[in-house]
Amino acid sequence: MLTNRMYRILSTFLLAITFYVADAQTITDITPSPAEITFKEGEYHFQDQPKVRFITLPEGRMPAESYRIKVDRKGISVSYSDPAGAFYAQITLDQLLPDTMGSSSLPYCEIYDYPRFPYRGLHFDVSRHFRSLDFLKKQIDAMAMFKMNRMHIHLTDAAGWRMQIDSYPRLTQFAAWRQQHTWKDWWAGERLYAEEGAPESHGGYYTKEELRELVEYARQRHIEIIPEIEMPSHSEEVLAAYPELGCSGQAYKDSDFCVGNEEVFRFLETVLEEVMDVFPSEFIHIGGDEAGKQHWKTCPKCQKRMQDEGMTSVDELQSYMICRIERFVNSKGRRIIGWDEILQGGLAPDATVMSWRGTEGGIKAMEMGHDVVMSPGRYCYLDHAQDAPFKEPESIGGYLPLDSVYVYEPAEPSMPADRLHHLKGVQANLWSEYVVTDEHAEYMYWPRAIAIAETAWSQPQRKNLDDFRRRALIALDALRQKGYHTFDLANEYGERKLAQTGLEHKAKGCKVIYNKPIQEWYPAAGETTFTDGVIGGWTYSDKRWQGFLSDIDVTIDLEEIQQISYVGGTFMQLIGPGVFMPQKVDILVSEDGEEFTSVATVWNDVSTSAPELLFRSFDTICDVRARYVRYHAYRSTMRGFLFLDEVVVN
Ligand SMILES: [Zn+2]
C-alpha cells in the first residue's frame, strides 16, 4: 500500500514524465510519418487514459487503410471506414499515448493518414537457416508497429525445404535437414541432406498447423503472408529428395527442374495446391530467379518440349513453365509474383514482378502493363553490412547503412507517368546465408526495415532524412524495450572518414594517362577517378573505386615541375568476391614524361587469406622534383580484382 506521502511523490514524478513525453513532440515522432498533420490552438488534458471515440464510417467513405485522428477539447476521435484503417489508427495512438498513468496532454490537432503504396513488404529467408515460429511472430509484431503489411517467406531453396507437404513427405523427412549447423559450413562441404532425426542433423520445417497459426497471427495484424516456392531453379533440395524431377534423374546433379517432364508439373501443382490450402494470400511467389538452364540444352525431354512448342531458346522454356504454373494458380483464384528473371523468354500474362537486380526489370514490366514491387539490391538488400564492416558481424559484404536504405525513391523519373499505378510498393529482403541466429536476423532488420516501411507508407514530400534518423532512435528504443535485439544506431560509426570529407592534394584535378585501359565493370568516375579527391567507402560497388582485372598503370601529369614529398594510393582486399591487394606497386617520376626514374617499389605484406575487409596504403615518402608521376600496381598472383580510389601526390 502506498502512503499518502509516497503517493504524492510518485504522482508528481509521473506528472513530470508524462508532461514531458506527451507534448507536441510526440505528434511529430510518429513513424512512419503520417500524410497530414495540422496543429490547432490549445491542449487536451486528461487523467490516466484519454477519452477516445471510434467512429466507423460506411465502407468506401475513406480511402483503403486510411484513418483520421482529431484531438480537441472533447478528447480524441478516430474515424475510418475499413478494419485496416481502424488498426493503423490504433497503432498511431499506441505511439502517441503514454503507457504510464497520471496527467497528460496532447495538443489540439488533426492527423489524416493513408499509405502511399498498398504493398509494404519484408522478406524472410528461412531456408538458409531455419527460424522459429516465435521469431516470425515477433517480427510480425514489429512490422505491424510500422504499418507494414506483407511478409514474404522464402520457404524453399537448396539449403532446406521448410513446409510440410503431405503428398511428398521426403521434402521434410530429408530435404529439410543437413549435418552442418551453418549454411557456410554446409556450402563449403559436399552440400548433402540428412534424414530427419539422424544424429547431429540441423534444420527443420513448419507443420501446416503451425503455418496456419502464423497466417492467423499475421491476419489479426493486417499482414498477409506470401509463401515462396522456388522454380525452376534453386531446387537442389527437391531434386535430391525426388531425383526423377531433374534432367539427369540423379540426386545431387541438378538445380533446375526438368521442364520437359510432365511429372514435374504434377509435382509443382500438387505442392502449390497444398500451399494455397494453407496460405490464403492473393499472391503466391514462384521464385524464378537465377536459373542456370544448362541441362535443358542437352536433356532429351526438355529438347522435345522445345520442339513440340516451337521454341528456339531455353529462356522460352522457362517462360513456358511460369506461364503454365500461372494458369494453374489463376485457376484457383490467386496470382503469381516472381523475381524479375521471369521476364526472360516472355512474361506470363498476369504476373507481378519483384525487381531485385536493379530497377530496369521492374520498369520494363510496368511498361508492359504489369504490376511491380520494387526491391532493388542496392537499397533493399539488408544482407549487406549496415555499418563499418570491421565492427559488424560477418555478412555477404557490401555496405548498406540506414541512410542509404532511406533515400531510395521507388518512383523513378524514367518511369512512364501513365504506368505509375502499376508500382504497387516496396520490399526489403534479408537473405540469410551468413545470418545464423534469430538475434542476428533481428539486428539486420531493425532499424533498416523501418526505413523501408516509411518509404512504402509515407508520402514522398513527408520524408526527411535528418528527421527520420531522430525518429528512428525513438522507434529503436521502443523496440528494445519490447526485447528486440536491434542495431545500435546511436553509436553508428558510419562511412570511412575520408570518404565523407574528400581529400585535397597536389594531383587533384590533374590529367591521368592510362597506360592500361579502364575496364568496363567498375569504371567509377572514369578518367578522373584517381585525381578527383573523392575517396572510396566501405564497398567497392560505391562507384568511387575503379576496378581492374589487370595491372593498374597510370601516369599523372602535374602540369609543371614541382617538389614532391609523398605518393600513395589505397587498395582494398575482400577475398570472398576475389578482391586482392596488388603484388607490388612501382612509383616512378619524370620531368619530361619520357625518362622515368624509380622512386620506390612497395611490396604487399597483407595475407591473401585474411577473411576480413582490409585497406592498405601503398605509398612512399620522397624528396624529388618532377612533373609526371607513374603509379604501377601489379595484379595479385591470386588474380582477381584490384580496386584503387585515388592516387595522392603531395
Ligand atoms: Zn530436362
Image (cartoon, grey):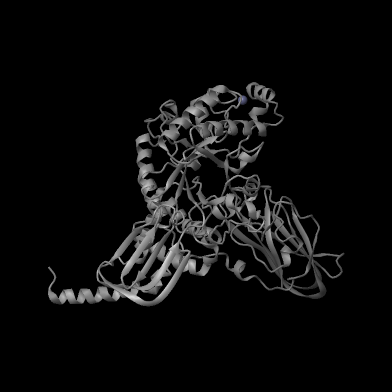
**Could you say which is closer to the camera, residue 134 or residue 27?**
27
Front-lying residue, 258 or 611: 258
Q: Assign the C terminus to one quadrant of the image.
A: bottom right
Residue at 56% over, 62% down: 407
- Compared with 122, 190 (above or below) is above
Where is residue 283 drawn, in percent x and y?
A: 49, 41
Count of numbered labels shown in the rendering: 0
Q: Tell which quarter ligand 1 is in.
A: top right
Q: Tell me residue 442's x, y (percent).
A: 42, 53
- Which quadrant would residue 415 be assigned to in this image? bottom right
Out of 494 and 354, give the one closest to the viewer.
354
What is the quadrant of the N terminus in the image?
Answer: bottom left
Residue 562, x across and y down, in percent: 79, 76
Above or below residue 339? Residue 296 is above
Question: Residue at horizontal 59%, vertical 31%?
Answer: 321
Decide if residue 203 is in sight here.
Answer: no
**Which residue corresponds to the image point at 28% horizontal and 67% vertical from the top-left?**
50
Q: Is residue 396 left or right of residue 619?
A: left
Q: Is residue 449 visible?
A: yes
Residue at the spot 51% in from the left edge and 29% down from the top edge: 268
Rendered location of residue 539, percent (x, y): 60, 57
With respect to residue 564, does 436 lie above or below? above
